[in-house]
Amino acid sequence: MILHQAIYGVVESRGHGLIQASGNLPLAQAIAYKVDLPDTVPTGVECPSYLTGFLHQETHYVLARVTVDRGATRAGMVFSHAIFIPAEEIGKIADLRPLINLLTFSRKEAMQSKVEPVEVDLNDLTTAPYINSSHVVGVTNALVSGGELPVICCGNFDFDNLMVSLWGMLWPALRLRFAFRLTFSPRDLELDDRLSVALSPPQLVSRWGAYQVIQDVTSSHATSLASELLRGAASAEPLRQFMQDIALVDVDSFKKLRLLTYAYEHSRAGERKLERVSSAIRIIGEQIAPSPNIGVNLKANLLTEFVATFESELTPESLFLLRNLKMDAFPSKKVLWEAVSSWVAHQEFSPNQDEGILDNLREAFSSPHRGTDWSRAVIAGVLFALENPNQFMYRAIWRWLEKDLPCATNIIEATGTKVPEFETELAKAVPKALSKEASEAALMIARQHSWWVLHGAALACSVSPQEAVKRQLQVDKSVSDNSGVLEALKHASDQETLSAALEFDDSRLIAIAVEIVVKTPALLADHDC
């Protein structure tokens, strides 16, 4: 493998810059500022020689040593020596030591000859060195803890050795993104948000209150499964298998590794399984494996496990939380939405469930969610309950007309028109009394669809029998069908029915009255016929 080199330092009249390079000159010039000090050296601080490593424009990984140039005419100047490793090769390199040995500390030494490309045997770099840094465990714990990055190494210890040890533990995708350098304060990190680990002089420890600081041997034990995985511990084998099952061989950040661990731990949940498996589904589908083509079997098994919790754990409140699940990453997502529909369809629709179910239905009909898989599943469940039929469901609709008229109207319009027996079943379930608002809403819907049985039923429980018949006859012109008129008369006595027939002279009313008189002729005694 051919590696190009560049040296940087004091350039007359320009400060720090490129002195010479063996290869791509624009590439070497582009990273000059990154192999300079990040800021002015604070007063009273001794600036160490340090290693820095970072990926540049996805094409090269840069490894460099930066050393204070004590022979410079200006204070705060440095000499830097960098090598450029092709990005496609860096992940294969497990041992940085042979590359670090190529980097010189001395400007004088570097200037004695022309900078030339250097050839290294990649096979000599593929075996990770023995980990001999006592700080490795503490740093790995911090890298995957979820705290602010970079991890700040702020003690008197061998930073080179720490980086070599950490590098050897990482897998190829993580190596490519692993970045480290010197820092003096949070200010010099503002334009560099990709650092993993940073070295800071121990005198500056007070500046790092918001960061994770390693000052000494902080821990001898991994504090998380993710940390164990980084260290290659056998105890992390289930997590490693989980990573393979989901086809995540390219976990390229510590954040993604932490999320992967959360997903694994939540997927193995005991208590509160629905909530925790739901979290695992969100993490996998939205953050670590958004492609539907990877981890297909694991995702299918996770969904099967998830829907199995519905019978014992799903509630209207937790159903509401599922509305934001993004399921495009799950090829078998149909299983989930069918389970949601089935759960809705088989509810008791008791009064104490009304608020929770109405919350879901309001959301299902709201513009942000209308037409989503979740919305369609909820509405399909309602439709199934109406088709079966479920008298509890029909009674609930009347309650919902009282509690949330717009939502109940939406439900009737979306589902009732698709159920042949809807009008009849809803009329059967009408309560003994209706508020004026609910009654008028039901009457309006009935008139729109020519549902005269429902119209009569709504009138019967909201106005007097005489008024009910009068209003029914004003709109119900189906002279060959008296079912709507009969519903309007549901709470009328025989005498009231006879009086209505005599008053309104409607053929349907007369036919109903005749049947009554045939059974009870004495009713005519009070009428002058």
Image (cartoon, rainbow, N blue to C red):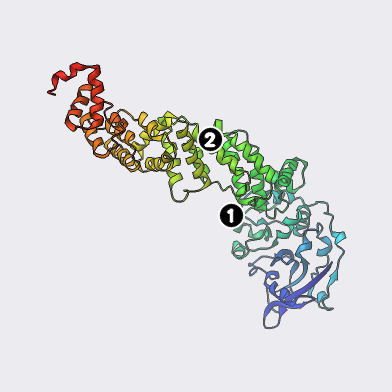
Q: Element type at marker 2?
A: helix
Q: Is residue 429 visible?
A: no
Does residue 32 lie above or below 369 as drawn? below
Examine the image and state in which quarter residue 107 appears.
bottom right
**Residue in the image at 73% along x and 76% along y:** 9
Depicted 159 relative to depicted 355: above or below: below
Residue 121, percent across and down? 87, 63
Q: Residue furthest left?
A: 528
Helix, strand or loop at disc 1? Answer: loop
Q: Nearer the viewer, mark 1 or mark 2?
A: 2
Q: Is residue 337 left or right of residue 155?
A: left
Q: Answer few, some or many: residues within 10 Å of disc 1's Cα (few below 14, many 20 plus, some between 14 and 19).
A: few
Q: Measuring 23% from the left and 24% from the top, which residue is drawn there?
A: 513
Residue 105 quadrant: bottom right
Which of pointers 1 and 2 lies earlier in the amino acid sequence?
1
Where is residue 374 drawn, in percent x and y?
52, 44
Which of 489 and 515 lies nearest the eye of the viewer? 515
In the picture of the structure, the residue carrying the numbered disc 1 is 210
Gap between marks 1 and 2 measured at Cα? 49 Å
Describe residue 347's horizontal placement relative to residue 304 as left or right. Answer: left
Q: Position of residue 64 (x, y in %)?
A: 75, 67
Quadrant that contains the N terminus: bottom right
Residue 479 to residue 263: above or below? above
Query: How far across and down, in percent of the image, does residue 284 sit?
Result: 63, 47
Q: Quadrant of the C terminus?
A: top left
Image: 121 above or below 271: below
Q: Which residue is mark 2?
A: 342
Label 2 sits on what residue type?
Answer: Ser
The answer to which quarter of the image holds residue 463 is: top left
At horizontal 65% and vertical 50% (from top left) the residue drawn is 292
